[in-house]
Image (cartoon, rainbow, N blue to C red):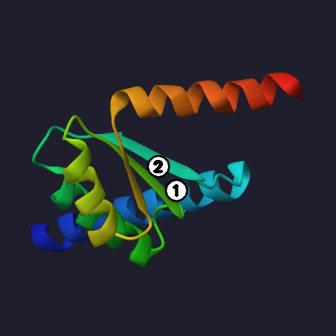
């Protein structure tokens, strides 16, 4: 009998959480335009696969940027392997942020 009460409690909590997330998304109209992650060298492919999986589920935005310290050749290979994901070095990412800031300053 106690199991039925516990299962009902967990189900009610899950429903409350789902409603809370739906309400928050509806109120903020939040949509991610770009997802930027920094991964250690050697973990780029696994992270890219997870991001593409999230995109397929509709849980992440259309643009992904992975910042890694891997070499230029490795980044080029990964860019060809995972279309739709941009692989940048930290220096390239900082330069891109400065360009975006300059565009916003002109407005």
The residue positioned farthest toward the bottom in the image shown: 56
Q: Nearer the viewer, residue 45 or 16?
A: 45
Would you name the residue on which mark 2 appears? 35
Q: In front here: 50 or 7? A: 50
At 32% across and 72% down in the image, what residue appears? 53
Q: Is residue 67 above or below residue 56?
A: above
The quadrant the C terminus occupies is top right
Q: Using residue 21 as the reference point, say whether residue 25 is left or right of it.
A: right
In which image quadrant can residue 71 be found? top left
Nearer mark to the viewer, of 1 and 2 = 2
Residue at the (57%, 29%) spot, across then down: 97
Residue 27 image offset from top left, x and y in percent: 72, 52
Residue pictured at 46% horizontal, 49% vertical:
35
Residue 51 in the image: x percent, y percent?
33, 62
Element under label 2? Answer: strand
Do residues under tags 1 and 2 come within 8 Å of each other at their CB atoms?
no
What residue would you read off at disc 1?
A: 21
Secondary structure under tag 1 reads: helix
User: On residue 78, which mark appears?
Assistant: none
Q: Earlier in the sequence, mark 1 or mark 2?
A: 1
Residue 69 in the image, given as x and y percentages of width and height: 22, 34
Identify the residue at image location x=46%, y=59%: 16
Residue furthest to the front: 73
């Amino acid at each position: 009998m106690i199991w039925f009460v516990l299962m009902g409690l967990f189900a009610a909590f899950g429903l409350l959480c789902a409603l809370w997330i739906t309400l928050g998304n509806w109120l903020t109209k939040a949509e991610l335009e770009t997802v930027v992650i920094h991964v250690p060298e050697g973990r780029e492919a696994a992270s890219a696969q997870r991001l593409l999986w999230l995109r397929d589920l509709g849980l992440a935005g259309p643009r992904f940027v992975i910042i890694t310290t891997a070499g230029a050749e490795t980044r080029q290979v990964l860019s060809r392997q995972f279309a739709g994901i941009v692989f940048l070095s930290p220096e390239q990412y900082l330069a891109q942020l400065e360009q975006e800031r300059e565009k916003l300053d002109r407005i």
